Structures are given as structure tokens and as C-alpha cells.
């Protein structure tokens, strides 16, 4: 079952926003239990606005700090807390798991996207809301194992356009 990727912003407090994105999940339940897969969302923090203070780019502190920052923000699989919920309202416990998802900085119009995935299995308890029966189930959650900077948008240019893989957008050919 594939759930389309979507992003939502939820205001948590004055300085933090969370971005929730839906992912694909495979669920194996007994036939008498929940028949639809759970909805999975991952929590990622959105950009925060900062007020820059001008300093010299050539100082050793600045160059060392920039080098360390580049290492920390490179495009790699990162531990991400993923929410799991049943579409019929059944209670799932635990309601979160941790899997690797691609994250980090890319230059230009490129995004940090998954280039290779694997499925990770977890065991959860599901309490059906109507019967209050508890079922132990195995779920399969996709995990990113390799990442790359690439174009998030598919090539869908008109006849008079060409897709630019550097800018990740269609450009006119005339």
C-alpha cells in the first residue's frame, strides 16, 4: 500500500514548526484484526529565521566553524521519529518508531532524497476500538539506507522546454 508524500506544518510554539510527511507502510495483521495499514508520519523540524551578524569570512574560527557545519548538515540517512496510527482509530502501541530518513543540505534547487531503501520490521500492539481486543502485529516501515542530492520533481516539461538537472526545473529551449 502506498500513501502519497504530503507535508503539513503544525505550529507547536512560538519558535518551532514541525513538518509531517506520510510514507509507505506494509502491515501484517490477522484477518480478523485491522485490515488497513497504519498511517505513518515523520517529525522533522522546519527552518528557523535567524538575524545574521557580519564577521570576517577569512578568520580561522569562521572557516573551522563552516567546515564543521558542512559535515553535520550533509545529505545522509538520519534517525527520525515516525508516528504510527491505524486509519480506523484503533490504538497502536508503541505509537512511534525510529527509522533512518534522508535529511541534510543540498546546493541549488536539489533536495536530499533517498536513493536506496529497505524495510524494517517492528512489533506493535493494536487495540481495536470497538471490541477492545488486543492483537500483536508485525509492521514493516521503509527506511532510507542511501541518500543523494537530486531533483524531487519529475521531468514533465512541455515540447518547447528541456529539463535542467542542475536547477531541477524546465527551461525554455528557444
Image (cartoon, grey):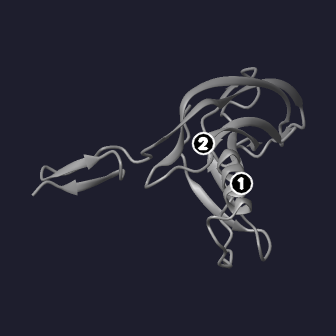
- Residue 37 placement (x, y as % from top left): 66, 34
Can residue 139 be seen from the camera position used here?
yes
Q: Residue furthest left?
A: 174
Locate the C terminus by quadrant: bottom left
**Total numbered labels placed on residues in the image:** 2
Alpha carbon distance from label 2 to label 1: 20 Å
Is residue 162 or residue 64 the one in the foreground? 64
**Could you tell me which quadrant the N terminus lies in?**
top right
Which residue appears at 26% of the width and 53% of the height?
Answer: 170
Near-viewer residue (21 or 171)? 171
Q: Residue at x 88, y 37 (%)?
A: 93
The residue labelled by disc 1 is 64
* Residue 4 seen in the figure: no
Q: Nearer the viewer, mark 2 or mark 1?
A: 1
Q: Residue 38, position in %: x, y?
A: 70, 38
Direction from residue 134 to residue 87 in the image, left or right: left
Dots 2 and 1: beta carbons under 8 Å? no
- Determine which quarter of the picture holds residue 119: top right
- Label 2 sits on a secondary structure element that is loop
State whether residue 143 is above or below residue 107: above
Residue 46: name its quadrant: bottom right
Residue at (56% x, 40% y) in the render: 3
Label for residue 164? none
Q: Which residue is mark 2?
A: 75
Residue at 70%, 66% (x, y): give it: 10
Q: First in sequence: mark 2 or mark 1?
A: 1
Query: Could you say where residue 139 lies in the image, as x and y percent from the top left?
Result: 74, 26
- In the shown orientation, is residue 101 left or right of residue 97? left
- Identify the element where label 1 is drawn: helix
Q: Is residue 125 left or right of residue 165?
A: right
Amino acid at each position: 500500500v502506498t500513501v502519497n508524500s504530503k507535508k503539513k506544518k503544525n505550529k507547536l510554539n512560538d519558535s518551532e514548526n514541525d513538518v509531517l510527511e506520510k510514507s509507505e507502510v506494509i502491515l501484517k495483521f490477522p484477518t480478523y484484526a485491522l485490515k488497513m495499514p497504519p498511517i505513518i508520519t515523520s517529525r522533522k523540524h522546519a527552518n528557523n529565521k535567524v538575524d545574521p551578524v557580519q564577521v570576517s569570512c577569512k578568520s580561522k574560527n569562521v572557516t573551522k566553524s563552516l567546515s564543521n557545519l558542512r559535515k553535520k548538515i550533509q545529505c545522509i540517512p538520519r534517525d527520525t521519529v515516525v508516528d504510527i496510527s491505524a486509519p480506523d482509530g484503533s490504538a497502536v502501541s508503541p505509537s512511534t518508531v525510529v527509522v533512518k530518513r534522508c535529511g541534510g543540505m543540498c546546493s541549488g534547487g536539489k533536495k536530499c532524497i533517498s536513493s536506496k531503501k529497505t524495510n524494517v520490521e517492528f512489533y506493535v500492539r493494536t487495540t481495536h476500538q470497538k471490541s477492545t481486543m488486543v492483537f500483536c502485529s508485525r509492521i514493516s516501515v521503509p527506511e532510507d539506507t542511501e541518500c543523494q542530492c537530486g531533483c524531487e520533481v519529475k521531468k514533465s516539461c512541455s515540447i518547447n522546454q528541456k529539463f535542467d538537472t542542475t536547477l531541477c526545473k524546465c527551461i525554455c529551449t528557444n
